[in-house]
Amino acid sequence: MKTNSSSPVFPLMLSVLILCFVSPCLCKKEKVFTNHTNIYDVMQHGARGDGKSDDTNAFLKAWSSTCGAGGILATLVIPKNKSFLVNNLVLTGGCKATSIHIKLDGKIVAPAKGALKDKSYWIRIQYINHLTIDGGIGGSIEGYGSTWWQCKTCSRPTALFFHSSNDLTVRNLRITNTPGAHIAINGCIGATFSQILVNSPGNSPNTDGFDISYSKNITVVDSTIATGDDCIAVNGGSSYIYATRVACGPGHGISIGSLGKGNSFEVVEEVHVRNCNFTGSTNGARIKTFPGGSGYARKITFEQIQLKDVKNAIIIDQNYGAKMANNKMSKVHI
Ligand SMILES: *[C@@H]1O[C@H](CO)[C@@H](O)[C@H](O)[C@H]1NC(C)=O
Ligand SMILES: *[C@@H]1O[C@H](CO)[C@@H](O)[C@H](O)[C@H]1NC(C)=O
Ligand SMILES: *[C@@H]1O[C@H](CO)[C@@H](O)[C@H](O)[C@H]1NC(C)=O
Ligand SMILES: *[C@@H]1O[C@H](CO)[C@@H](O)[C@H](O)[C@H]1NC(C)=O
């Protein structure tokens, strides 16, 4: 539920489109540049892939080549049957190629708790537009979270953090046992997550499946989320958020908020949850707002929902986080 706020970056694809209409030769020329040489394998940049050596620098070298490559498509390859340990990995755009692919066929694993240098994040992907991450058949991310979960009050890093990246596609990815949230999306416009398998134990603390904030047009589809916190949390500044054919449980359900923490003004609108199953989760549809906060949550729909062994099918809590009823009811309108 922890997120960094920032304003999203808007892509200026329109000018590219206009360019193509005005001058078709330009687009053709661009096509000539397309070749299969813009493929950068982390193994060729010094990665060991033994799950023990720190491969962060190899990833950064391969990323630097990928991001610096021109043309229409540049691809970073993380090969299969290998396990790559990375420590505070940051992949930053803007890249030269129109689209970037990350072919994640192998496994990425976390360092031990004590070895993570900056405990506020693990993998960060930022300012990259038109990015596709495809886990192929074996792509996975393992967070080795159990040592972190023992301390429930300690701050624990989000595993995969997307920030200010527009037109994002993530598919066929397994992400398991993360110390904090599995996937956070902040300041992004246009993202589709499909065939994502999130799996952490029901008693792992603050391990939200998806944590969405200050983002627009985000879809989670055909995915399975088993976790110890919200399957999907839609936080302040988010709109046009879609969850379709998601199986949630264990977990705390699909939640709007919590909104209005620390007397803040927060807004969420156009959230549409459809054709989802909740099995063994504490909640199904949930909206939670803090006392003292303001703003609104509106145009929220849940439809074609199946609930099995769910404690609260629908729960709207406007006094969230308050131990006892107090006089400072939330002013967040629902
Ligand atoms: C395509 O291949 C050439 C020759 O290997 C290389 O110089 C170039 O960077 C590659 N990519 C593009 C976009 O031209
Ligand atoms: C990957 O491992 C599997 C099972 O161990 C094996 O069948 C397969 O041939 C390996 N693939 C490669 C490319 O090494
Ligand atoms: C929403 O994002 C998707 C990509 O995830 C894109 O195809 C679609 O056009 C976007 N819709 C709007 C209204 O921007
Ligand atoms: C939900 O459960 C039904 C059976 O009750 C099943 O047919 C459907 O595929 C499930 N949907 C998801 C998204 O798991």
Image (spheres, grey):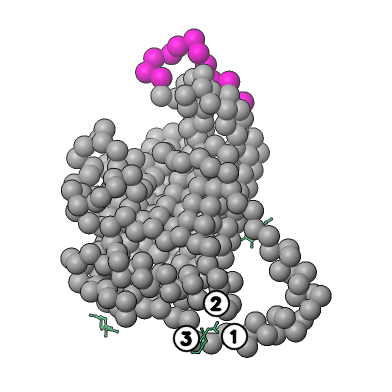
Residue name at image x 58 percent, y 48 percent: 8
Q: Is residue 222 visible?
A: no
Amino acid of disc 3: Thr
Residue name at image x 61 percent, y 44 percent: 239
**Which residue carries the number 3 mark?**
37
Residue count near mark 2 (Cα–Cα under 10 Å), binned few <14, some 14–19, many ≥20: some
Distance from disc 1 to disc 3, alpha carbons, whole Å, reads 10 Å
Stretch of the chain drawn in magenta: 322-334
Amino acid of disc 1: Phe
* Residue contact between numbered discs 2 and 1, judged by CB atoms under 8 Å: yes
- Residue toward you, 162 or 38: 38
Q: Position of residue 143 (x, y in %)?
A: 28, 55
- Residue toward you, 231 or 50: 50
* Residue 234 sits above or below residue 10 on the image: above
Asked if the magenta segment contains residue 272, the reply would be no
Mark 3 vs ligand 1: CB under 8 Å? yes
Residue name at image x 38 percent, y 73 percent: 62
Q: Closer to the N terminus: mark 2 or mark 1? A: 1
Residue name at image x 68 percent, y 85 percent: 29
The quadrant of the rendering that contains the N terminus is top left
Secondary structure beneath disc 1?
A: loop
* Residue 272 sits above or below residue 191 on the image: above
Residue occupying the far top of the picture: 327
Q: What mark, if any, has residue 70 been given in the picture?
A: 2
Q: What mark, if any, has residue 333 been given in the picture?
A: none
The quadrant of the rendering that contains the C terminus is top right
Q: State whether the magenta stretch is mostly helix, strand or loop.
A: loop
